[in-house]
Image (spheres, helix red, strand yellow):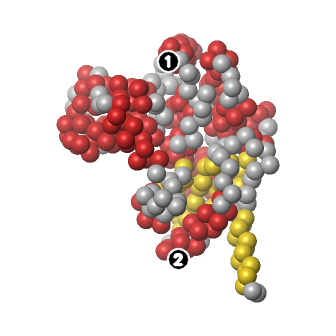
Amino acid sequence: MKQDDTLWKGIIEDLTPLFMLYFFPGADQILDFARGFEFLDKELEDVFPADNPNHPRFVDKLIKAYTKAGKEEWILIHIEVQGYHDENFGLRMFTYFYRLLDRYKKPITALAIFTDDKGNYQPHSFEYEFLGTSAAYKFNTYKIIEQDEEALANDPNPFALVVLTALKAIKHKKASDEDLMTLKMELFRTMISRQMDKPTMRALANFLKMYVQFSKPEWHRIFETQTKSITNDITTMGIEEMILQRAEQKGIEKGIEKGIEKGIEKGIEKGKAEGKTEVVSNLITKLGLNDEQTADIAGVSIALVRAIRERLAR
């Protein structure tokens, strides 16, 4: 089985305040949460173009957050999710830092979340020295494999359950579908035992459903059935409903109740080629569906899905 780290982008957007409080305790004392957060994906791509072969696109987020200072000022929070060994990671983080600082002239903090299973891999700095000139850059890091399962399960912040899901995925990456089913149901029961609002529950449930996929589709259907039987289909959101909600947010206002096929069809008709590409991109990046699932739901060819996936991976 393979974990899909691209889903971190979606869960960070869905649960930004909880994310901030989990990784930066006391952040609400410095940042003005009431003003919300802004995601600067376009600005990040301008700093590091995705089509640059020397700097492939990684799972990262750039967030603008306002402080509680008297005057209007803001900081940039740069997040990286790294799931493999990269000997140039420190340099890349430093490059992001100085380009962002040069562009915005604002305070910047950076966080690297490591989702690999290598216990000895956790770069946290970049240092340079030549002929009396030197530079040293340090950034925040978080190693998921080093976290304690019990502590995560008992953490009052719901975002700890995202980390717990990722930790379980790392530790049990060779699990069979049957064992993975047991693991996911255990995590799901842990989630619903907590008192949390419905949007938070839905975001967590979808992350759990999609972060690690069963190798055989029938196990996904079994998991859906069992989770719905536990919750009476009140707190969880099926994949189809989630897709329709995102389509609705893009302006599809009529005919949604007629079904997923017609909902997506309307989105494609409205946005033409752009709408079709956006639907496929969301299915890949937000839900983590494989090529066959994406092609089937979006009503496009597998060749098109693969082309869009390849472009997103650059």
**Whether residue 153 is situated above or below residue 26 in the rendered picture:** above
Residue 288: image x %, image y %? 48, 34
Distance between the alpha carbons at the discs numbered 2 and 1: 48 Å
Indicate which disc residue 102 carries.
2
In the displayed image of the protein, which residue is found farthest to the bottom?
132
Taking the spot 79% from the left edge, 45% from the top edge, the residue there is 119
Q: Is residue 243 left or right of residue 110?
A: left
**Residue at the spot x=73%, y=57% of the render?**
123
| Relative image position of residue 109 (x, y in whole percent) | 63, 64
Q: Is residue 40 left or right of residue 109?
A: left
Badge 2 vs badge 1, beta-carbon distance below 8 Å: no
Name the side, left or right, on which 126 lies relative to 307: right
Q: Residue at x 31, y 25 (%)?
A: 260
| Res 24 quadrant in image | bottom right
Quadrant assignment, res 300 = top left
The local crowd at label 2, few if under 14, some if 14 to 19, many if 20 or more residues have their Cα within 10 Å, is few
Question: Which numbered circle lies on residue 217?
Answer: 1
Q: Of the residues shown, which amino acid type is indicated by label 1?
A: Pro
Quadrant of the rendered structure where residue 153 is?
A: top right
Sequence-earlier tag: 2 or 1:
2
Image quarter of the N terminus = top right
Judging from the image, what secondary structure is the residue with disc 1 in?
helix
Q: Amino acid at mark 2?
A: Asp
